[in-house]
Image: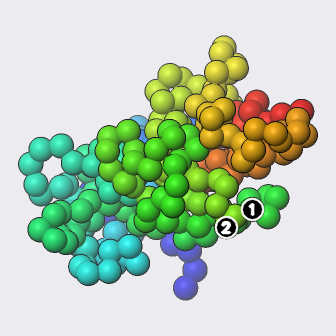
Amino acid sequence: MGLITKIKHSSHSEHFLLLKRPREPYECDGCKVLGFGPCYECEHEDCNFYLHEECAKDTSSASHPFSKYSLMTFHSRAPQKGERCCDACGQDVLGFVYQCKYKKKTHDYHPSCLKLQRTLTAEDGTRLHLREKLPSKCLNCGSRKTSNGIKGWSYVSSCGQYRYHVACVKDMILKKWKKGYFLQDGKVNETDNSLALQSAIPSRELELPSRKSSSKAKKTWIRKATKAIMIIISALFGDPTIMISMLVQQLLPD
């Protein structure tokens, strides 16, 4: 079956939605999460209505290897009252969500998080694997738990040296988006781009496997860590290669 490029969706039933690649970042009207890559957009430009591909193709239920004991049920909004966050990425649950209950606790997942690739391969061949729990500290935040206290999912390289919370990488880009770093047509705001993605650089305490590493080894390690971040960003936000690559290049050593 070929790719469906024109659909109707119950969340916006008055118009057709067309599969497009927007010219700028957008907020999905389904899950309320930022997106960069292809999405279903209302055929009427005045509507400014967008749905992630995952949100446009929602199903009544879903399963995931990290949720072995319960089938997840789709909701257009979290049925429980109060603030809720995605157990995968740590971001707020404000719209479309899959929920399951395990050990009397309700777990929430954004549709796009459930579709995250289990294995990513960077340009240099580094392979990153999606993990339910971190084997050791995240290189970005220096902790096994995220800033809001959840364990969260992570991407970990085969060698174990490069480890990042999904939550940390997602929060990094969201902060830059809110500060206006991303403009139209895949361009980056040049006003103060020297600060862009600075939070992606691992802390000096965690950065190197050995304090005795040579200058060349340090540069190689930082380059690999940064490329790992780039491939994770692409997996999370829909392959925003032009916008993200321009920012990431600033972090790569000469």
Q: Position of residue 16 (x, y in %)?
A: 39, 59
81 horizontally vs 222: left or right: left
| Mark 2 nearby-residue class (10 Å; few <14, some 14–19, many ≥20) | few
Front one among 111 and 228:
228
Q: Is residue 136 above or below residue 207?
A: below
Q: Is residue 2 above or below residue 130?
A: below
Q: Image quadrant of residue 129? A: bottom right
Residue sticking out furthest to the top: 191
Front one among 26 and 250:
250
Disc with the residue nearer the chain's start (2 vs 1): 1
Q: Is residue 68 above or below residue 210?
A: below
Frontmost of labels 2 and 1 is: 2
Residue sticking out furthest to the bottom: 1
Residue depicted at x 26% and y 81%: 69
* Residue for badge 1: 126
214 horizontally vs 28: left or right: right
Q: Position of residue 80 (x, y in %)?
A: 10, 54
Quadrant where the C terminus sits is top right
The residue under label 1 is which amino acid type?
Thr
Q: Position of residue 239 (x, y in %)?
A: 63, 53
Q: Image quadrant of residue 63? A: bottom left
Assess whether mark 1 and mark 2 are in contact (beta carbons under 8 angstroms): yes
Q: Which mark is residue 158?
A: 2
Q: CA distance from mark 2 to mark 1?
A: 7 Å
Could you say whether the residue bearing mark 1 is in a helix, strand or loop? loop
Quadrant where the N terminus sits is bottom right
155 horizontally vs 95: left or right: right
**What sort of colour scheme is used for the picture?**
rainbow
Q: Is residue 41 visible in the rendered structure shown here?
A: no
162 horizontally vs 223: left or right: left
